[in-house]
Amino acid sequence: MTTRLSDNPTTRLSDHRWGMAIDLDKCTGCQACVVSCHAENNVPIVGEEEAAYGRTAHWLRIERYWEGEYPNVKAKFMPVMCQQCTEAPCEAVCPVYATYHSDEGLNGQIYNRCIGTRFCGSACPYKQRMYNWFDPVFPEPLEQQLNPDVTVRSRGIMEKCTFCVQRIRRVKEDAKAEGREVTDGEIQPACAQSCPTNAIVFGDLNDPESRVSQMARSSRAFRLLENLGTEPGVVYLKGGETRV
């Protein structure tokens, strides 16, 4: 399932390469990140019946696994979102170029171009793209909390985690207006902001001094399915006594 992080964890695309590091030793599986992602990105609630058909609408899921041998078994948790791959399989299969790669390392999604072929979902080895089977419904009072910075997607398209790109753009625009550079830790995706144990760290992988870059170079670091050559922008830190 996992392999060790390579010695060259990033491919330089521009001044920034946004990435995320998740310390699995700190994750408690509380799913605060999942709830905050729903609220920030206008992700609809599909209900128990549709979820039973596999039509879940989470941009972020918590995988549970077991570590150790019986009776000394411990439950462990792993947040899984779009891995923002440098060599993304989803991009090559889209017939209308709705999914694209930005110069800052993000896998973008043009919703009004998508025609819902779901080829990208089939090509994604992490299975972290969702399809809108129905027009989104937000029962009262949930319609009162929709984020005006994020569009409400229509039926028949694919959608996924964007590292809260609207927050990235807002901070960059504010920094530009103030004539300064974006500082490390200034950009906080909803999942990182809401994590009670600070297990999720976001930042610029091209900055060797950033916290996320230092965590990516940790001896505990690995990436999901790295042997596939997708070069994900998400790095995980396996459980251990020493934390960065």
Image (tube, helix red, strand yellow):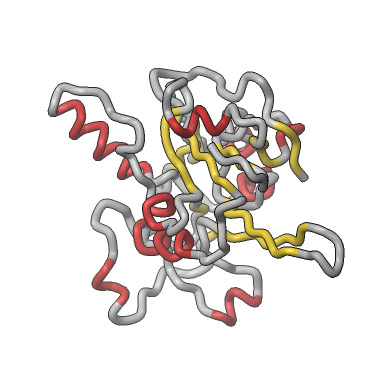
Which residue is rendered at x = 42% and y = 34% of the image?
A: 203
Residue 126 image position (x, y, % from top left) = 66, 48
Which residue is rendered at x = 81% and y = 58% of the image?
A: 68
Which residue is rendered at x = 37% and y = 42% of the image?
A: 165
- Eyeballing the image, is 116 above or below 9? below
In this view, which residue lies farthest toward the left?
178
66 left or right of 60 in image: right
Which residue is rendered at x = 36% and y = 63% of the image?
A: 39
- Eyeballing the image, is 193 above or below 211? below
Residue 118 appearing in the image = no
Viewer-side residue, 46 vs 228:
228
Using the rendered view, name the quadrant where residue 163 is placed. Answer: top left
Residue 184 image position (x, y, % from top left) = 35, 31
Residue 221 image position (x, y, % from top left) = 64, 35
Using the rendered view, name the quadrant where residue 173 is placed. Answer: top left
Residue 174 image position (x, y, % from top left) = 18, 34
Q: Which image quarter is the N terminus in?
A: top right
In this view, which residue lies farthest toward the right?
70
94 left or right of 75 in image: left
Using the rendered view, name the quadrant where residue 77 is placed. Answer: bottom right
Residue 195 appearing in the image = yes
176 left or right of 196 in image: left
Viewer-side residue, 156 vs 170:
170
In this view, which residue lies farthest toward the front?
241
Viewer-side residue, 113 vs 88:
88
- Eyeballing the image, is 11 above or below 137? above
Query: Number of marks in the image?
Result: 0
